[in-house]
Image (cartoon, rainbow, N blue to C red):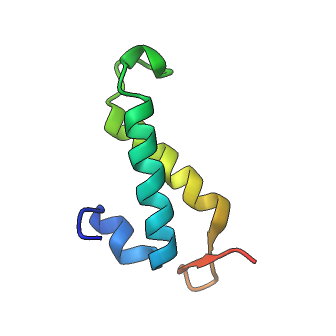
Amino acid sequence: MEELPEQVRNNLPEGGQEVFKEAYNSAYEEYADPRSRRDPDEPREEVAMRVAWSMVKLDYTKNDNGEWVKKE
């Protein structure tokens, strides 16, 4: 998944990377029209990034060592 941002590749396990990628791509398409965003001036890449991290946090959390792990 080389196309993912370094922060995602270096920190999330493979499953989390997949969640991130799917959520990012979906949000990027959904918010193509600036009128569909809360702030029409905010770049859709930033909106998609925020959505993707929100989706990751539904299934993953950081453990005591600061590593992302799947929630039980």
Instruction: Determine the residue located farthest toward the left in the rendered image.
Output: 2
> Which quadrant would residue 63 be assigned to in this image?
bottom right
Q: Is residue 34 left or right of residue 19?
A: left
Name the spot of residue 52 as percent of width and height, x first: 48, 51
Q: Is residue 9 above or below residue 65?
A: above
**Residue 1 location in percent, x, y?**
30, 70
Residue 31 percent across, percent down from the top left: 42, 28
Q: Is 15 left, or right, of 69 in this rendering? A: left
Count of marks placed on residues = 0
Residue pictured at 48% horizontal, 50% vertical:
23
The residue that appears at 29% across and 61% down in the rendered structure is 5
* Residue 67 as seen in the image, left or right of residue 35: right
Considering only vertical position in the picture, is 8 above or below 63? above
x and y percentages locating residue 67 in the rendered image = 53, 81
User: Which residue is the extreme one toward the top?
Assistant: 35
Residue projecting furthest to the bottom: 65
Q: Nearer the viewer, residue 9 or 23?
A: 23
The C terminus is located in which quarter?
A: bottom right
Looking at this rendering, what residue extends furthest in the right direction? Answer: 72
Up/down of 63 relative to 60, above or below: below
Q: Name the residue at 34% across, 66% down.
A: 7
> Residue at point 47% right, 79% down?
13
Residue 39 against residue 51 in the figure, above or below: above
